[in-house]
Image: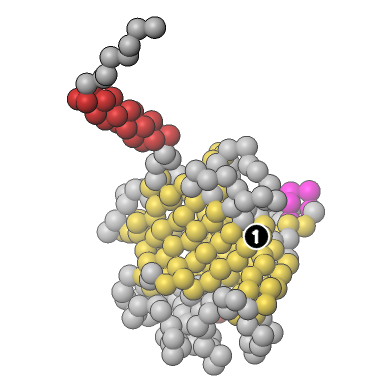
Amino acid sequence: MRPLHPVPTSAVVLGLVLHLLGQCSSSSQTAPASVQLFDGRTLNGWYTWLVDTRHDDPRHVFTVTNGWLRISGDGLGYLATRKAWADYTLKLEWRWGETNTRWGDRIGKARDSGVFLNATGPDGNSHDGNGAFMAAIECNLFEGACGDILLIRGDHSDGTAIEPRITAEVAAAKDAEGWFTWLSGGRSQTLRRWGRLNWFGKSPQWQDATGFRGLHDLEKPFGEWNHLECENVGGQLRLKLNGVLVNEARDIYPTSGKILLQCEGSEIFFRELTLHPHPEPLSPGVPQHPTRETTVAP
């Protein structure tokens, strides 16, 4: 047998470099890119729903101004993505509008809106389309209650029920309205069909009043921009407000759907809406989805 000739050191190094570069190139090609849900100029990729005018918006409730997405609050409804999503982190910034820009039963009360995740079923939340929202899991944007998780129930087009659910670790004591508060390390509790999971620092003295501020509230002073992150991956949901984890749930249902920005009587602005897909598979026991993005027309 002929003796092996040693490979020059420079050739070994060059081979390793080329191999690593190839891995980086392959990774960059397969890594999912972030998605800008709002381009700062138009409502492309979204559609509107109002309970009184449905897909028409004659009052210009949903507009773009100064590069921001504005929801006037005049009515009940939402701005919805045309696509349904699964496994992502949604990052956005929001702030309230002017003091006198509130409508209906929100006049004199706390400013109110929300981000609906995994919204599913028909627009109007029922087979006859006479409702205001869609079945979903809501991240509440509500003075003194930002970061609460709400279950929004609804119906399929055939009238069968859509019953959201979550499981979370909660404090032993319920709030004055009988709902639970998230407590990491607390006892396990499942909520079904409808209900609320308070964010961990919500004031026990919360009141539905303009400008309410609890002792531990993380919302910025009125007029300043707030940062929200909604991590919706593998049947788990984590909400961060201004960099702080405020609420968490697991075994959630639905696990995919549209994203809605709620109109509920208060003026609110949004900007920097970015969705960061996660390539990881869903956790065991959670239904798999054929794609991470499906087109859904209104």
The residue under the point 43% across, 49% down is 276
Name the image quarter holding the C terminus.
Answer: top right
Tell me: 137 left or right of 285.
left
Rendered position, 278 above or below 169: above
Image position, residue 192 (x, y; %):
73, 67
Rendered position, 100 above or below 248: below
What residue is pinned by disc 1? 252
Tell me: 294 left or right of 272.
right
Q: Residue furthest top?
A: 1
Rendered position, 5 above or below 223: above
The answer to which of 249 and 26 lies nearer the viewer is: 26
The answer to which of 256 and 207 lies nearer the viewer is: 256
Q: Which residues are drawn in magenta?
A: 155-159
- Can residue 283 be seen from the camera position used here? yes
The residue under the point 19% across, 25% down is 10
The residue under the point 70% across, 51% down is 285
Image position, residue 294 (x, y; %):
57, 39
Q: Main secondary structure of the magenta part?
A: loop
Residue 16 image-quadrant placement? top left
- Can residue 177 be seen from the camera position used here? no
